[in-house]
């Protein structure tokens, strides 16, 4: 069961994208169930945050509704049978970090035995649709009290300025999810929906799950340089390679998270496709399965890699920067793309050189030497 979360700022195109995605996926033979947004249902029932309930209690209600809906619709999809099943969420638990500070939200999740990492791991990919107020202001519709325009959306009271702020908060809330994609307003609306759809199909592996990434060797940034990066999230990764009977298939397990945010665990297989692309099959596993792999299948000829991964956005592209405890001078910067020929503006870091096609900078090679050389 594949799980996609659509999120974004006001007037970002979620409703249209949900409809298009459902139709296109069903035409490919998928069973598709859309999980409705919990906050809208609660507000439409007359429960208004800041008016008749506190913001914190409102988010508690939203979380309970979200958890209930996720369990309910997952059961419904299982009842439908088949082996091509997709849940599409109209917003997810991560959205709530936009309205509570991280400690408050983590404490709230703790009451339901959920960590931040587990909350993110509930969704295989997250698609953030930027508000039209950012780059397509002429198409932003809202209930403007100073206008009688027919195009106004009577149900939306966010001004363009408020929509921009909400969009930023929501995007920041999801920074740290391993498969976050941002859809901006650089094309017309049809193009925007099509790009969102392409991201979902790529994540699904239609027709083949590819990891297109460009990789750069950089000078290891100082704490001050890291702190200066906007929208940043840090997580620790422990990566262990497993024995493989097929030399063309790389197997590994990962433990991802922090003591504060909790941990999630993944099993991954990769194989080469050429041109910097690799087929990647990844699945979420539990702590017990992770421990079993670690004990019985770990490749002891390779080092286990420990690294701090900093995730951030720059020019609407999602970057990952890996800092290794054994390396004082260098670090690795990566950006994942759908198209290897896509133009990318790099963040203001000390870029030494591109190493996309240099296999000595892959984690598998680093696991042999525990060194980042130039």
Image: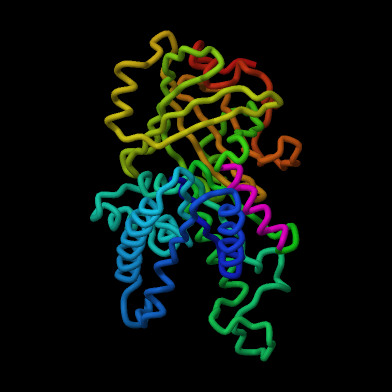
* Visible residue check, residue 288: yes
Task: Give the percent coordinates (x, y) of residue 344.
Answer: 72, 41
Q: Nearer the viewer, residue 189 or 35?
A: 35
Can you say whether 176 is above or below 107 in the image?
above
Q: Residue at 29% of width from left, 25% of height from top?
A: 291
- How would you classify the magenta stretch by its main secondary structure? helix
Task: Give the percent coordinates (x, y) of residue 281.
Answer: 51, 32
Q: Residue at 31% of width from left, 35% of height from top?
A: 286
Task: Give the percent coordinates (x, y) of residue 175.
Answer: 50, 49
* Visible residue check, residue 176: no
Q: Residue at 64% of width from left, 89% of height from top?
A: 146
In the rendered structure, does residue 69 fall within the stretch colored magenta? no
Is 61 on the left-hand or right-hand side of 138? left
Can you say whether 100 is above or below 235 in the image?
below
Placement of the C terminus among the 4 image quadrants? top right
Task: Determine which quarter of the picture holds residue 192.
Answer: bottom right
Is 3 on the left-hand or right-hand side of 291? right
Q: Hey, which residue is sitting farthest top in the picture?
A: 301
Residues in magenta, as a range: 190-203
Q: Nearer the viewer, residue 285 or 109?
A: 285
Task: Determine which quarter of the picture holds residue 293.
Answer: top left
Q: Nearer the viewer, residue 45 or 131?
A: 45
In the rendered structure, does residue 191 fall within the stretch colored magenta? yes
């Amino acid at each position: 069961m594949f799980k996609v979360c659509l999120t974004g700022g006001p007037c970002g195109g979620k409703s249209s994208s949900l409809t298009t995605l459902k139709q296109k996926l069903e035409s490919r033979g998928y069973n598709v169930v859309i999980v409705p947004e919990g906050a809208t249902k609660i507000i439409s029932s007359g429960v208004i945050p800041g008016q008749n309930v506190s913001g914190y209690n409102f988010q508690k209600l939203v979380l309970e509704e979200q958890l209930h809906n996720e369990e309910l619709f997952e059961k419904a999809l299982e009842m439908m049978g088949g082996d091509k099943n997709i849940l599409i969420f109209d917003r997810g638990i991560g959205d709530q970090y936009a309205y509570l500070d991280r400690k408050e939200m983590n404490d709230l999740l703790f009451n339901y035995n959920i960590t931040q990492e587990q909350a993110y791991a509930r969704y295989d990919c997250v698609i953030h649709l930027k508000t039209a107020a950012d780059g397509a202001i002429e198409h932003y519709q809202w209930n403007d009290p100073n206008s009688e325009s027919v195009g106004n959306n009577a149900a939306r009271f966010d001004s363009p300025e408020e929509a921009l702020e909400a969009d930023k908060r929501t995007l920041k809330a999801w920074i740290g999810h391993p498969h976050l994609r941002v859809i901006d307003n650089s094309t017309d609306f049809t193009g925007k929906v099509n790009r969102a759809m392409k991201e979902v199909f790529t994540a699904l592996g239609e027709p083949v799950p590819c990891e297109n990434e460009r990789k750069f060797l950089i000078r290891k940034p100082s704490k001050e340089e890291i702190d200066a990066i906007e929208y940043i999230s840090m997580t620790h990764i422990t990566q262990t390679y497993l024995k493989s009977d097929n030399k063309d298939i790389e197997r590994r397990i990962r433990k991802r998270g922090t003591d504060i945010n909790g941990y999630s665990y993944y099993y991954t297989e990769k194989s080469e496709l050429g041109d910097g692309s690799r087929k990647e099959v990844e699945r979420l596993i539990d702590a017990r399965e992770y421990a079993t792999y670690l004990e019985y299948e770990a490749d002891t000829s390779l080092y286990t890699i420990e690294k701090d991964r900093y995730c951030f956005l720059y020019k609407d592209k999602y970057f990952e920067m890996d800092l290794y405890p054994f390396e004082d001078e260098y670090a690795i910067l990566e950006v994942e793309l759908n198209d290897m020929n896509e133009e990318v503006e790099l963040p203001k870091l000390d870029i030494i050189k591109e190493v996309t096609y240099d296999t000595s900078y892959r984690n598998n090679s680093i696991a042999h030497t525990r060194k980042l050389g130039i």
